[in-house]
Amino acid sequence: MDFWFQTHSVGAGEEMRIRGEIGELFKQADSDGDGKLSPEEWKNLLTSAGLTGTSEEVDHFFATIDRDFDGRLSFAEIMGEDTSVEKLFKIMDKNGDGYVTKNEFKTICKKLTKEQVQIAFKKFDTNGDNRLNYREFCEMIRKHAEAQN
């Protein structure tokens, strides 16, 4: 959606109004109130708007814009904005190489012991290169959030 706003000349006030309307639709569609839309909630939103979409189309849409790989869409993802996970990854990836090393991880997560960092990397560094790529990082964040709930 950010791209849409960049390619269409609308004033700041109009952009805020459109974002607000989309936000309201998002809240209404988020039937379980978890701040994300499931494929089923998305299908319901399409239906309520008088649109139809096949399961394959919805799956493709989700695969295209679900940037934190959790199978659900946040408002930020729908709007084309960085998600909180993307922002965190960029903060932790100090040198901007697309990976989080153990040292980069430790500079942000100061309360974790060296052993806790080792355990996290052993569990989520699936290719064994001693750093987390974005997808591995997302999986770690998702698992941590699930454990908190």
Image (tube, rainbow, N blue to C red):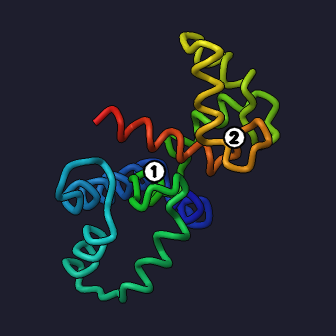
Q: Which mark is residue 132?
A: 2
Whether residue 17 is situated above or below residue 90 in the rendered picture: below
Instruction: Please report contact status of discs 1 and 2: CB closer than 8 Å, yes or no.
Output: no
Q: Which mark is residue 86?
A: none
Query: Which residue corresponds to the image point at 67% horizontal and 48% vertical from the top-left?
Result: 126
Q: Give the amino acid at mark 1.
A: Ala
- Out of 54 and 81, give the one closest to the viewer: 54
| 135 lies left or right of 55 | right
- Out of 109 and 147, give the one closest to the viewer: 147
Across and down, in percent, residue 38 comes to 32, 63
Q: Quadrant of residue 112?
A: top right
Whether residue 86 is situated above or below residue 45 in the rendered picture: above
Query: Which residue corresponds to the image point at 45% horizontal and 44% vertical from the top-left?
Result: 142
Callout 2: helix, strand or loop? Answer: strand
Q: Quadrant of the C terminus?
A: top left
Q: Give the amino acid at mark 2.
A: Leu
- Out of 22 and 104, give the one closest to the viewer: 104
| 106 lies left or right of 74 | right
Q: Which residue is labeled 1 in the image?
A: 76
Point out the tag, 1 or 2, that comes first from the N-terminus: 1
Disc 1 versus disc 2: nearer the observer = 2
